[in-house]
Amino acid sequence: MYCGSCMRDNTLTAALRAMGRNIKLVPLYTPIRTDEPDVSEQCIFYGAINIYMQQRFPLFRHTPWWIDRVFDSPTILRRVARLSGGESYRDLGELTISMLQGEHGPQGKEAMKLIRWLKKVRPDLVNLPNAMFVHLARPIKRELGIPVLCTLTGEDIFIDKLPEPFSRRVIDMIRDQGRDVDGFVATSEYYASHCCQRFSIPRNRMHVIRPGIRIDSPDRVSQSPAEPFTIGYLARICPEKGLHILCEAAGILHREGRLFRLCVAGYLADSDRPYLDTVRKRVIEQGFNNTFEYLGELDRAGKQAMLRSLHILSVPTVYREPKGLFILEALAHGVPVVQPCHGAFPELVEATGGGLLVDPDNPRALAEDIARLMDDPGLRQRLGCQGQQSVFESFTDKVMAEQTWSLYQSFCCEANNARNM
């Protein structure tokens, strides 16, 4: 699927390179998948097949590296990734703990490979992509003597699904090994505060850099899309993202006699097909199946065409979203949003002025605010214009890149001063 964290990292890397900065984006587990040109390195570390084989079969912890490179082929990894999704959370819990053991665990060979590559590249700083890699901070600092940062983008959502004792053990290991990380980067004030508490991170080691998006054609809001009133959903199709809540709200609007179209797009894993079937069944029961449309997973052009057709967008997540890229993408097209009042949404809506907030898990409240925007085109236009202007000014890839590079420079300067003392 298009991964929000991969998309953010790829956009950030491309923007930094456009500024003339020397930066490398290194894929871990599998090749990244993004709807923009892929600017990542061709090499892959911690390849998904190798870490699985090393977990299950001790022999693979000692195989020559040239054999590992066969399984790290981007083509093979992409094919295997399409078949993933059937793992039990108990197995994933065991693998996560094994990974966090780092250079002393079953996947220790993978840490050695990455550090050997880093020695050849000789970076001034390394930014780990998530908390599952905090085990690398200590050996990187020992072998290269450089600052190590770690970005936090939603790890707790995965950790919370792990059964005990795995969940608690993973948190304890991240807390312990996180002490070796020089600084953490969160994508929202909400997630910064949450992670400081969850992973016992001192607040002075936490930095917030909100996501930014690439603006292809900065066209200002001009006119309302064609009728009927179109409600959009653009996210992965899964219970956590709350499509069922939006459909219940749409059912309320339908019973009130309102005319609308519900346009849904996003990645659908095989494991979530029963969920979509249940949602479709409920749509039929509520009588608006003729106005419900699932477009599948869209590429960049398809996504932009969909956004241009919307009057509003709503992704009423059940979990507390740490990023909200789909909010920024909608607002960039002048589409106001109606979102639950939790996670990063309140600060995004406040910062952009581009939407309304409702009580979480409340289809009635969601329907009422959607109806409010249906009935008030002027309000809808104002929210769309305010949101679009704010995104163009404060939530672009350039802004994100400038803030990130400034943070990197501060850590590198501090490290240089420490070495010269």
Image: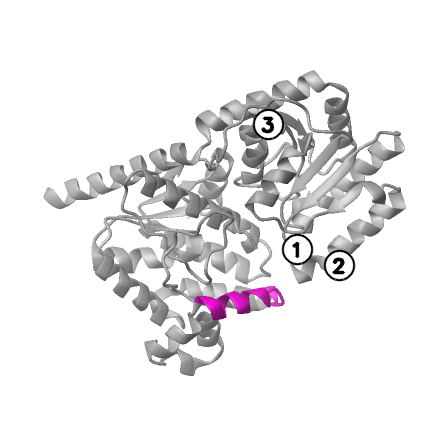
Residue lying at the far left in this picture: please name it: 421
Residue wearing tag 1: 268
- Residue drawn at x 50%, y 29% as measured from the top left: 218
Quadrant of the drawing holding the N terminus? bottom right
Q: Return the mark for residue 334.
A: 3
Q: Position of residue 275 (x, y in %)?
A: 74, 55
- Residue drawn at x 33%, y 76% as measured from the top left: 65
Q: Secondary structure at mark 2?
A: helix
- Residue drawn at x 57%, y 27% as measured from the top left: 349
C-alpha span from label 1 to label 3: 26 Å
Which residues make up the magenta segment? Answer: 74-89
Q: Position of residue 242 (x, y in %)?
A: 69, 44
Whether residue 48 is visible, yes or no, is no
Is residue 77 inside the magenta stretch? yes
Q: Secondary structure at mark 1?
A: loop
C-alpha span from label 2 to label 1: 10 Å
Q: Amino acid at mark 3?
A: Gly
Residue lying at the far bottom in this picture: please name it: 59
Query: Answer yes or no: do the residues labelled 1 and 3 have beta carbons within 8 Å?
Result: no
Please name the predominant secondary structure of the magenta segment in the image.
helix
Q: Is residue 255 left or right of residue 380?
A: right
Look at the picture and state if 123 lies above or below 187: below
Q: Return the mark for residue 274.
A: 2
